């Protein structure tokens, strides 16, 4: 009794990579993800390597993984890949506290995020 195979959710010219427990808020991660949406993969990787935000390192790793999935699993041409989607979502939030004056408590939230990047092969018009 194995798992019932499901139909592939993406098109034949698409590949996906996800990262689940990325440390940092979804709002900050989305700023970096929004900067690469719609870009060609080559240009997006170059842009992320010079981005000063900490989350750019994680986004770059996921994008590189999506490119590797496209090349190895789906036989897509790496030179004609475009970042079709870069979506960010919430994961768990660790809640901590810090002792404050007069016996009170200051709440500290440590959020985690999810990142999903879809790359699509497009035909170049000459």
Image: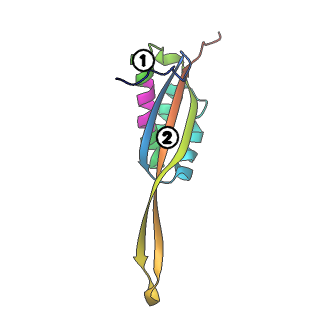
SS assignment at label 1: helix
Residue 37's image quarter?
top right
Residue 115: mark in rendering = 2
Picture coordinates of residue 16, whole percent (x, y): 48, 28
Residue 51 seen by the camera: no
Task: Please say whether residue 62 is one of the residues in the magenta stretch.
Answer: yes
Q: Which residue is mark 1?
A: 71
Picture coordinates of residue 106, whole percent (x, y): 47, 76
Q: Residue at x 43, y 87 (%)?
A: 103
Which residue, as the protein is rendered here, is positioned at the far front? 1
Task: Please say whether residue 74 is one of the residues in the magenta stretch.
Answer: no
Which residue, as the protein is rendered here, is positioned at the far left? 1
Magenta segment boundaries in residue numbering: 60-67
Q: Quadrant of the N terminus?
A: top left
For disc 1, the neighbor class at 10 Å (few under 14, some 14 to 19, many from 20) is some
Marks 2 and 1, how far apart at CA: 20 Å
Q: Residue at x 43, y 42 (%)?
A: 20
Q: Residue at x 53, y 15 (%)?
A: 12
Say above or below: 84 vs 48: above
Residue 114 seen by the camera: yes
Picture coordinates of residue 47, whole percent (x, y): 51, 36
């Amino acid at each position: 009794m194995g798992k019932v195979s499901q139909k592939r959710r993406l098109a034949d010219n698409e590949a996906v990579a996800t990262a689940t427990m990325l440390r940092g808020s979804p709002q900050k991660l989305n700023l970096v993800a929004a900067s690469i949406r719609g870009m060609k993969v080559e240009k997006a990787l170059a842009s992320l390597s010079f981005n000063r935000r900490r989350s750019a390192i994680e986004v770059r790793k996921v994008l590189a993984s999506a490119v590797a999935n496209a090349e190895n699993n789906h036989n897509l041409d790496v030179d004609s890949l475009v970042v079709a989607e870069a979506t960010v979502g919430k994961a768990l939030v660790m809640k901590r506290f810090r002792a404050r004056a007069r016996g009170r408590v200051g709440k500290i939230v440590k959020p985690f995020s999810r990142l999903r990047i879809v790359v699509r092969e497009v035909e170049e018009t000459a």
